[in-house]
Amino acid sequence: MALNTVDFVNELIKNNYTHLCVVPCSFAKNVINEAINNKNIEYLPAASEAVACSIAAGLKMAGKNPIVIVQSSGLTNMASCITSLLKPYGITFPIITSWRTYKEGDSEIQHQHLATELPKLISAYGYRYHILDNQNLNNAIAQINDCNESHTICVLKKDSFDKVELKIEHTLDLSAYTPRSKFLILLNEKFKGKNTLFIGTTGNAAREMYSFMPDTSNFYMAGNMGGALSVGLGAAKAGKKVIVCGGDAEFVMHMGGLTTAGRYADEVDLTYILLDNEQNKSTGGQNTYQAHLDYINIAKSSGFYVTADVVKTVDSLNSVIKDVKGLKFVHVKCGIDNETPRPPLKIVKVNKF
């Protein structure tokens, strides 16, 4: 049995909750979808969990009633906001975190530690926790209200809510764009057998690299969202030729990695390919709401050499990706593919390039 998602969100509204500050998680996608659909609560997608937490703190201090929704691995990104802002200032609002599980042999190793240690992490923050009651709506709302009045986190287990699809006006039509797989197939052909390290970011970018780039040297980073470029910078500083392939949501999570990389533009051979499909595909396909960003000028002002305007075709990518030399940035506008399998554990769990 799962809670009725529409009823749950409507009860949040009746209890005067005003905003959902969110970094999407597949466990919470139905609540997120309903919040996007419902005009009576404001959906605020954030670049990172720390940003979501800080926005919520500002809202609460200004008299609003926000809720933060993140996944368990993202709860660690909120550590400074929780321990140096919420706790010492006595700011409380509901934080809903998924509790991602882990089965031995699963390649989703980013969830392995917190699958057992999440309660200890919450306790270390000085918080209590509830496991959201997914059998009784009144109990679930009472738990949320308790989190609003105390330093308590609400833990969400898988399949706690029934299915809600995004209304058509909130979905994206990417049919005019070349699917991401076509660009990855080109990279596989172009760099087959070459001494170039590819780093795939968490989510679908790494999964699709596994399916469509079998002949290149790949590192599939299952977690650490926002950190792929910095991992690539470290490898490049160690003498590797590196290409990082990441999505638009990953791009904004830790943008300090861009400015840091720019300091070493004359010392590294590192290319960052942004595969921009405007959505969080692996967590439900919600819009990233980043169309206002000029990725090229952000990269350029951070110290990257930008090879071209926005790339929309395979031929265009082929013409700008000639070698890996210096610090370069390529913005590829792409469509989506059907779901691809995750790389197996023996392929993912490597710690040497």
Image: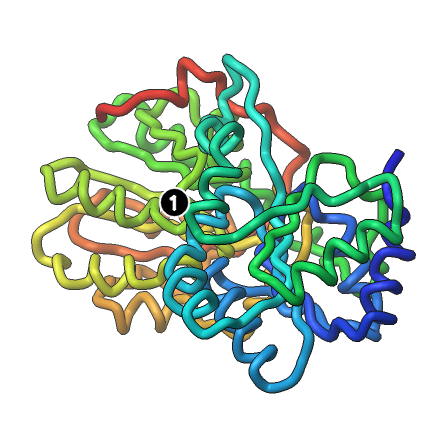
Instruction: Describe the colour scheme in one phrase.
Output: rainbow
- Residue named by callout 1: 318
Mark 1 secondary-structure assignment: helix
Residue 70 shown left or right of residue 4 in the figure: left
Looking at the image, residue 46 lies above or below residue 223: below
Q: Position of residue 19 (x, y in %)?
A: 69, 72
Residue 105 shown left or right of residue 191 in the figure: right
Q: Position of residue 300 (x, y in %)?
A: 28, 69
Residue sitting nearer the eye, 302 or 348: 348
Q: Residue at x 32, y 66 (%)?
A: 299
| Residue 52 showing in the rendered view | yes
Q: Residue at x 64, y 53 (%)?
A: 96
Residue sitting nearer the eye, 273 or 223: 223
Q: Residue at x 52, y 38 (%)?
A: 119
Image quarter (top left, top right, bottom left or bottom right) of the C terminus: top left
| Picture mark count | 1
Looking at the image, residue 274 lies above or below residue 135: below
Image quarter (top left, top right, bottom left or bottom right) of the N terminus: top right
Q: Residue at x 22, y 24 (%)?
A: 352
Find residue 7 and report its image quarter. Answer: bottom right
Find residue 256 and report its image quarter. Answer: bottom left
Q: Position of residue 282 (x, y in %)?
A: 61, 41
Q: Position of residue 291 (x, y in %)?
A: 57, 69
* Classed neighbour count for the residue bearing mark 1: other residues with Cα under 10 Å, few (<14), some (14–19), many (≥20): some
Q: Amino acid at mark 1?
A: Asn
| Residue 185 showing in the rendered view | no
Residue 112 shown left or right of residue 98 in the figure: left
Residue 258 shown left or right of residue 30 in the figure: left
Residue sitting nearer the eye, 251 or 314: 251
